[in-house]
Image (spheres, grey):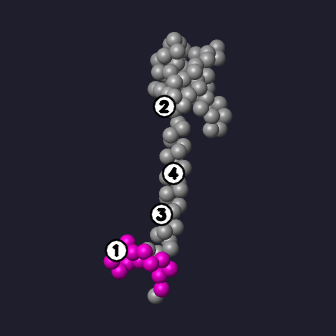
Amino acid sequence: MRYPITTERAPGRPLSRTSVLIAAVAAVTFGWLAEAAAHEVADGTLAAAIRASGHPCARVIEKKRADEGSSTWHVRCNSGRFQVTMKSDSTAEVVSMD
C-alpha cells in the first residue's frame, strides 16, 4: 500500500489525503466564520452607543446592516430608529432616523 503523503501524525501512521483535505476545508471555513463574527455587533453595544450619543435606548428590537460588509447599522430601539456607524477607533456615530 502506498501513501501519497509521508508526514506522520503518529509513529507508523501516515496522514491520508482525505485527512489533509478535511483539515484544509475546516481551516478555511473556521477562518471565514471567525471573520464574519468579528464584524457582527452585539445588540448591547449598539444600545450603549445610542445612549452615549444622548438618545434613550433600553434595548434593541431590530438591527440590519445598511450594506453588505458595511459598518453602518439601521437599528430600531424601543425609543426610535437610528443609524449607527461603528468606527475603527471603537467610537460610534449615531443619527436619529425619526
Instruction: Please give the label number shown on residue 10.
Output: 1
Instruction: Give the structural element (helix, strand or loop) at label 4.
Output: helix
Q: CA distance from mark 1 to mark 4?
A: 27 Å
Query: Residue at 39% across / 75% down in the picture?
Result: 8
Identify the main secondary structure in magenta.
loop
Instruction: Please give the label number shown on residue 31.
Output: 4
| Amino acid type at mark 1 | Ala
| Amino acid type at mark 3 | Ala
Judge whether residue 8 is colored magenta: yes
| Amino acid type at mark 2 | Ala
Mark sitting earlier along the chain (1/4): 1
Instruction: Give the structural element (helix, strand or loop) at label 1.
Output: strand
Q: Is residue 27 above or below residue 48?
A: below
Q: Give residue 21's position: percent from left, percent from top.
A: 52, 67
Q: Do the residues under discs 2 and 3 have CB atoms within 8 angstroms?
A: no
Foreground of the two, 89 or 96: 89
Mark sitting earlier along the chain (4/3): 3
Residue 65 lies left or right of residue 23; in this view the side is right
Judge whether residue 92 is colored magenta: no
